[in-house]
Image: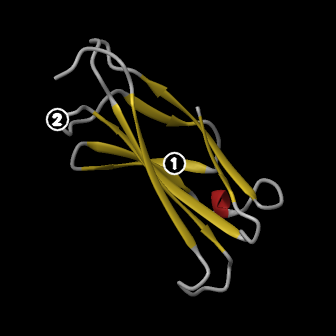
Amino acid sequence: MTVRLAGADMARAGFQLAVRTPAGGQAGRLAPADARSAVTDSSGIAYLHHTAAGSMPTASGEAEWRFAWMAPAAAAAAVLHVAANAANGDASALGDAIYADSLVSGGQGP
């Protein structure tokens, strides 16, 4: 899977995502595809996020992070939550853009 972010004035970028059950528990397993991202566990939830190296754009005005998600063995719905930021690189909160979205997979409901 890939998280892709684009912005004309983007000098740095970042993201964080988690895949949860509708009840809020961990759904499946996340694995980064390369050194641009890493997984951190917090209270039983795995969060995939950018690394320092992964905050650099992959092309002019674009950043992407690749990863694998292994679905849980039992068929169930899963909700992917993602937040990303496109920063202009001036080390201030001005001129940066924050985005958030979610995606619900199929499967059996709760």
Q: Which of the two discs, 1 and 2, labels the residue nearer the N terminus? A: 2
Q: Which residue is mark 1?
A: 38
Q: Residues within 10 Å of mark 2 (few under 14, many from 20)?
A: few
What residue lies at 33% left-to-right and 19% top-to-bottom? 72
When asked about the image quadrant of residue 20, the answer is top left
Question: Residue 43 location, x and y as percent?
Answer: 21, 49
When asked about the image quadrant of residue 74, the answer is top left
- Callout 1: SS: strand
32 or 86, nearer to the observer: 86
- Callout 2: SS: loop
What residue lies at 31% left-to-right and 13% top-to-bottom? 73
The reply, left or right, for residue 86 in relation to residue 57 is left
State whether residue 68 is above or below residue 87: above
Q: Residues within 10 Å of mark 1 (few under 14, many from 20)?
A: some
Which amino acid, mark 2? Ala
The reply, left or right, for residue 45 in relation to residue 59 is left
State whether residue 31 is above or below residue 58: above
The reply, left or right, for residue 30 in relation to residue 10 is left
What residue lies at 35% left-to-right and 27% top-to-bottom? 28
When asked about the image quadrant of residue 30, the answer is top left
What residue lies at 31% left-to-right and 15% top-to-bottom? 107
Question: Residue 46 location, x and y as percent?
Answer: 35, 43
Q: Which residue is mark 2?
A: 23
Q: Tell me how far mark 1 sits from mark 2, CA to CA.
A: 25 Å
State whether residue 33 is above or below residue 83: above
The reply, left or right, for residue 81 in relation to residue 62 is left
Question: In which quadrant is the C terminus drawn?
Answer: top left
